[in-house]
Amino acid sequence: MKPTKVSFLVKPIGVIRKGRILLNRQWIKGLQGIEGFSHLLVFFWLHKTHKPDLLIHPKTGKSFPKIGFLATRTPHRPNPIGFTVVKLVKRRGRELWVEGLDVWDETPVIDLKPYTKREWIKGYRIPSWVKRLDRLEKDPLRKYAS
């Protein structure tokens, strides 16, 4: 099978500003009805990252074995697309107040989707090193296993 050599043009629909999502004016009507959802999937372009090393220590924890970057949540990726689930607190016009957003200010937003039962997975599996990382993590929003 030949590798695909297709290029993409991704245009931001908004930006992260002071922990809020500010959509471009042209997309305001597209937000109609979003207030009915408690949570959103936010997709963004990790504009301050670099090309990944193929093998890394998870969260730079030297006590953890090196693993492939694709087996981690590192922001350093060939296509630095990030996403997270956030709680929608309120909407005013093109601005969304959310909780749980962990990105740099001025990060370009490339898409939003409502979080529904479809995204909820039961019985997922994670490796033991992730559970070990979680025990060391102080911020509950940054835990993966619990």
Image (spheres, grey):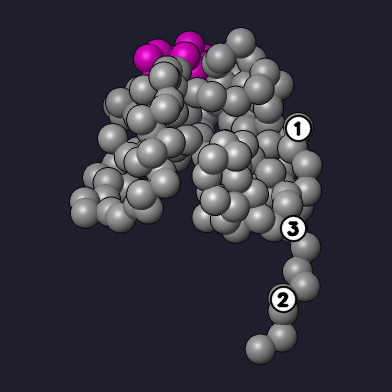
118 on left or right of 104 = left
The local secondary structure at tag 3 comes to loop
138 on left or right of 110 = left
Q: Is residue 72 magenta?
A: no
The local secondary structure at tag 2 comes to loop
Residues in magenta? 87-97
Name the residue: 30% across, 26% down: 38
Q: Quadrant of residue 20?
A: top right
Label of residue 4 in the image: 2
Residues under labels 1 and 2: Cα distance? 26 Å
Q: Nearer the viewer, residue 3 or 135?
A: 135
Give the dominant element type of the magenta stretch: helix, strand or loop.
strand
Q: Earlier in the sequence, mark 3 or mark 1?
A: 3
Q: Nearer the viewer, mark 3 or mark 1?
A: 1
Contact? badges 1 and 2 (CB < 8 Å): no
Name the residue: 52% across, 44% down: 64
Q: Nearer the viewer, residue 101 or 15?
A: 101
In the rendered image, residue 28, in percent from the top left (x then y), is placed at 55, 25
In the orientation shown, which residue stands out farthest toward the bottom? 1
Which residue is denoted by mark 1 in the rendering? 48
Name the amino acid, label 2. Thr
Which residue is denoted by mark 3 in the rendering? 8
Name the amino acid, label 1. Lys
In the orientation shown, which residue stands out farthest toward the left? 122
In the rendered image, residue 75, in percent from the top left (x then y), is placed at 63, 40
Name the residue: 64% across, 15% down: 17
The local secondary structure at tag 1 comes to loop
Image mark count: 3
